[in-house]
Image (spheres, rainbow, N blue to C red):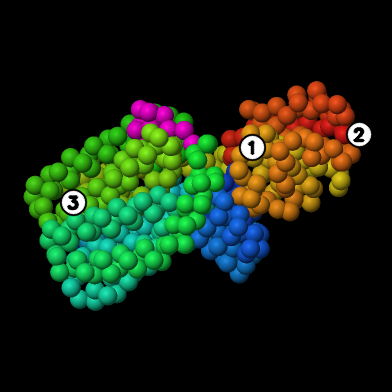
């Protein structure tokens, strides 16, 4: 039976790699991905300066740049960098989770990771989420090992501290999560193993010192741009968004929410039963869910005053929830329940994969760029007031000078250095008064620079507005052409 489970587990790892590779040929971007690509293409100085003005830590961008310096900066290379951590996490479930918690737990972990609908999406997205998932999983695992083992403790504590710091430098919800992991570890040490208290303080100080530069950057970002101007948290809808997030992704249906609620309730009820049977054995699983709950609760509490939370920010700690569900399923003898959940995951994954594939590989994605490419001239400039469609134009037509018209005066000029040298920020149209020639105006569904230029002296309309929907980003491009005399 063990060999049979091992073979299934290895097959799942291979399948994870194969399926994720299907998404790396997507040549389309949305704003956050364009930002990652833009930063990785900057020199080291610009990357660090612009990244420091972003709302995320810069470690991911630095790793991405190193990777593309070695393997090239093709879109495939950018996406493969996100595939690798998911595959490594799947392998980690075989090399570590399986050995520590049993064959079934490891195999179920790999299975759930593969068939969660969000995995295919965020496992190929050019962002830090897959990397943060890997780092947090390793952090949590070695926190548990450091607490459990009396032998080779130094190795476990060192790895726990190293990956804690890496997690904190990858995503700020990762920072919050390692804070909760450290506090949870402290609670168990004080209650059950006080002889480890000295080690906890020593390695806690090491983590704090190693993250001091990150804390300075975090404080700087908070004072400059991390004001949540683009984030909104809608209560009580956010609670259902949290329940459905890992199961819904691009699916436009209430079914993922229902399924997610069923899985959540099942997990809690089953863990309660297991807790009554063996309280000590179930502690790691309860601790994992406790940490998830603390992170979400703190984030929602802070968001009452300054919105900082969106559901995808749960991805760094997702391995903890996957572990809890994997353990629950592996310790349930009712095959019909396990069958329903596994088949449900597969069905939702196929459903989401189909909808995601259609948006990622739709020919509609290229139409706004084809419209411009057929008529653009070397001396033409671009101007836009929304960075979503604008950033994609900046990446597509990087030989033409472009301007982000910052009408709302956001403090983003340095952060948007990721799109240098083709893009600059301007505060008023007066900054273009020395320019004479053609101007491509890129509006979105929510902006209308077109109307402003029509009413501004010196600008004449050359080509009426044409609208295109970009399925992958969800943006609408409203493209018009003006002449400035």
Nearer the camera: disc 3 or disc 2: 2
For disc 1, the marked residue is 409
Mark 3 vs mark 2: which is more N-terminal?
3
Q: Give residue 5's quadrant in the image.
A: bottom left
Q: Residue at x 52, y 36 (%)?
A: 229
Name the element at disc 1.
Answer: loop
Magenta region: 231-242
For disc 2, the marked residue is 485
Mark 1 vs mark 2: which is more N-terminal?
1
Mark 1 vs mark 2, CA separation in Å: 27 Å
From the viewer's perspective, tell me whether residue 105 is left or right of residue 457.
left
Which mark, by number, is residue 50? none
Name the element at disc 3.
Answer: loop
Vertical comparison of 482 with 28: above or below: above
Q: Residue at x 24, y 62 (%)?
A: 144
Q: Give residue 137's quadrant in the image.
A: bottom left
Percent x, y for residue 244?
A: 37, 36
- 114 magenta-colored: no
Percent x, y for residue 194?
A: 14, 65
Q: In front here: 233 or 415?
A: 415
- 241 magenta-colored: yes
- The quadrant of the picture occupied by the C terminus is top right
Name the element at disc 2.
Answer: loop
- Would you say the residues marked 1 and 3 are in contact, meaning their CB atoms lie under 8 Å apart? no
Which mark, by number, is residue 331? 3
């Amino acid at each position: 039976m063990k060999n049979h489970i091992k073979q299934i587990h290895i097959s799942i790892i291979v399948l994870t790699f194969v399926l994720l590779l299907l998404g790396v040929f997507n040549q389309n971007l949305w704003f956050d991905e364009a930002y990652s690509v833009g930063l990785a293409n900057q020199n080291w100085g610009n990357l660090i300066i612009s990244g420091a003005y972003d709302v995320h830590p810069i470690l991911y961008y630095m790793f991405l740049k190193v990777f593309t310096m070695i393997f090239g900066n093709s879109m495939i290379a950018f996406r493969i960098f996100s595939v690798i951590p998911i595959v490594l996490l799947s392998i980690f479930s075989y090399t570590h989770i399986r050995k520590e918690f049993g064959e079934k737990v490891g195999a179920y972990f790999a299975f759930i990771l593969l068939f969660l609908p969000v995995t295919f999406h965020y496992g190929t997205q050019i962002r830090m989420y897959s990397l943060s998932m890997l780092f947090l999983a390793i952090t949590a695992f070695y926190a548990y090992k450091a607490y459990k083992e009396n032998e080779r403790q130094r190795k476990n504590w060192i790895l726990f501290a190293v990956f804690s710091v890496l997690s904190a430098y990858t995503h700020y919800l990762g920072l919050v999560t390692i804070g909760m992991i450290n506090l949870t570890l402290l609670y168990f040490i004080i209650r059950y193993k006080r002889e480890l208290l000295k080690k906890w303080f020593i390695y806690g100080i090491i983590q704090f010192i190693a993250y001091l530069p990150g804390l300075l950057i975090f404080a700087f970002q908070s004072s400059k741009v991390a004001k949540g101007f683009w984030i909104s948290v809608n209560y009580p809808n956010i609670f259902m968004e949290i329940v459905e997030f890992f199961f819904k992704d691009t699916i436009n249906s209430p079914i993922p929410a229902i399924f997610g609620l069923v899985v959540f309730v099942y997990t809690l009820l089953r863990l309660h039963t297991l807790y009554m049977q063996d309280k000590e054995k179930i502690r790691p699983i309860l601790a994992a869910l406790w940490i998830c709950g603390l992170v979400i609760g703190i984030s929602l509490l802070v968001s009452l005053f300054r919105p900082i939370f969106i559901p995808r920010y749960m991805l760094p700690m997702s391995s903890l929830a996957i572990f809890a569900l994997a353990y629950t399923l592996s310790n349930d003898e009712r095959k019909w329940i396990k069958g329903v959940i596994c088949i449900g995951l597969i069905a939702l994954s196929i459903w989401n994969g189909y909808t995601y594939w259609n948006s990622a590989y739709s020919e509609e994605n290229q139409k706004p760029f084809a419209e411009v490419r057929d008529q653009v001239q070397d001396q033409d400039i671009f101007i836009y007031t929304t960075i979503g469609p604008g950033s994609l134009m900046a990446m597509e037509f990087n030989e033409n000078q472009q301007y982000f018209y910052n009408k709302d005066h956001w403090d983003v000029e340095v952060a948007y250095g990721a799109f240098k040298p083709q893009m600059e920020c301007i505060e008023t149209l007066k900054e273009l008064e020395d320019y004479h020639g053609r101007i491509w105006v890129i509006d979105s569904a929510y902006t209308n620079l077109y109307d402003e230029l029509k009413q501004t002296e010196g600008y004449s309309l050359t080509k009426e507005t044409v609208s295109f929907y970009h399925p992958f980003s969800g943006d609408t491009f409203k493209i018009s052409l003006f002449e400035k005399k």
